[in-house]
Amino acid sequence: MRSLFRSGLLLTVAGASLLSCLSGDPDVGQSVIDPYQLQTQLVDSITVKTYTVIEPDSFVTATDSSLLIGQWADTQTGKLQAKGYASVDYAAHTLSDQSGVRFDSLVLELPYSFSYGDTTKAFTLQVHTLQEPLTAGATYYNYNSAVYQATPLVSKSFVALGRGETRQIRMRLSDALGQAFFAKLVSKEINDTETMWAYWKGFAFTNGTTDNVIWGINTGSEKTGLRLYYHLNDMEKTSSSVRFPIGGTHFTQLTNDATGSAVQSLKYKPQVLPSAATGHQTAIGVGVGFRTRIEFPYLSQFAKPDAYLGLNLAQLQVSPVRKVLYDNTPPPDQLALYETNSQNELVSTVPALATGTTSAVAGYEYLPNELELSDMYVFDITKYIGDILKGDAVNRPLILTVPASTVSLKTALRRVMIGDQELSTDRIRLRIVLTSGL
């Protein structure tokens, strides 16, 4: 991958030499200084150390409209597994009020939400019956689980569609199950949520394949549910159906097993794993449970040039280790920088820009028409670095991770490997532009 925004950075440097009175440190380029006696200098050789650390935070999955099913396994971060759990909710109907009602079929209808990974291979979706109902109104997290019957109630193999497409997976249950459920509805033995949950305790959704793909069910769709099809025994054989929603109570369980991976030695929050131990890369991913720790060990001792006046620009450029765009495994849309401590906790946000009035958050950007992928996260941390150089701020280690405000099941799946300074390509860089007198 070639360096992104190479031309943009050169423009920034050129602009800095002309506009030093208007940017960076407010003391740079005062009226008493002849602007023709100023020069700018680009420095991109500052040492940056990176480490992989554990992300211990849990997050609520019960409020997300998606249920995830599948796995992602690699040698870098281990094996991530996703299982979904959902209730089957009662719906009002008129089956018992109509004469001559005949059962047709009972179908589980599951609209597609999104996918992550290889969607070109068949995916086997398995649906199991829960042994006990979920707790209505409970807050379920990514670490929660529920006990289910080992033998699937129904399963189906299909090819998930790619990005931006939708479809509905239809899984027909046995007629024996359908007839029994139909009879309970007609007799009014099932007549509310309590009796419904006593009969259908809920479903667990698991995958029956080992390919790297995770598939999402849209529980928020009006088409999602257990649908009972029937017809009237009249001259027209009038057909109709009742949809019993799935997901009034639902959650996704995410578990990651790092055994055999490059990060398997990480067990506790204070641990750090140097990038050199993981192929000169570090990991970031909410679902897999890893963050990247960044240190500038010698920044406080940085040797400023003679006649140093101030800092115009400081950019931290973070390069994902990625070769192609269209592999259905996108990195996080955004990453954020936080100050941290010896426990690798998020202590405070890092100020951004020359003013420090916003937090250091960068979006994933790429050049779409390049023959070789050019992509990067670029953080403007001018004030933060400037304060350290002036001795007004402590040079603390940083954490690079997904912003907490953007965490969802979709963002939790997205992981990214970040290159360090020793990797042959995709290197992390701290680039600063200084102003000094001639």
Image (cartoon, rainbow, N blue to C red):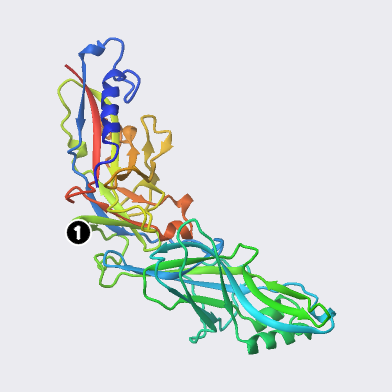
According to the picture, the residue beneath numbered tag 1 turns out to be: 279
Occupied quadrant, residue 435 = top left
Q: What amino acid is labelled 1 in the image?
A: Gly
Q: Is residue 188 visible?
A: no
10 Å neighbourhood of mark 1: few (<14), some, or many (≥20)?
A: some
Q: Is residue 193 above or below residue 118?
A: below
Direction from residue 27 to residue 142 in the image, left or right:
right
Question: Which residue is at a point 37% across and 63% down the rendered structure image?
Answer: 288
- Measuring from the top left, give residue 363's x and y in whole percent: 39, 44
**Residue 185 at x, y = what percent?**
75, 82
Front residue (pair 66, 36):
66
Quadrant of res 232? bottom right
Q: Is residue 304 above or below residue 406?
A: above
- Is 18 drawn above or below residue 408 in the view shown? above
Q: Residue 264: x and y, percent?
A: 26, 68
Residue toward you, 224 or 269: 224
User: What is the secondary structure assignment of the residue under circle 1?
Assistant: loop
Q: Give the residue displayed 28% in from the left and 46% down from the top.
A: 371
Q: Nearer the viewer, residue 372 or 416?
A: 372
Q: Residue furthest front?
A: 235
Residue at the image position 31 percent from the left and 24 percent from the top: 25
Side (left or right) of 123 relative to 225: left
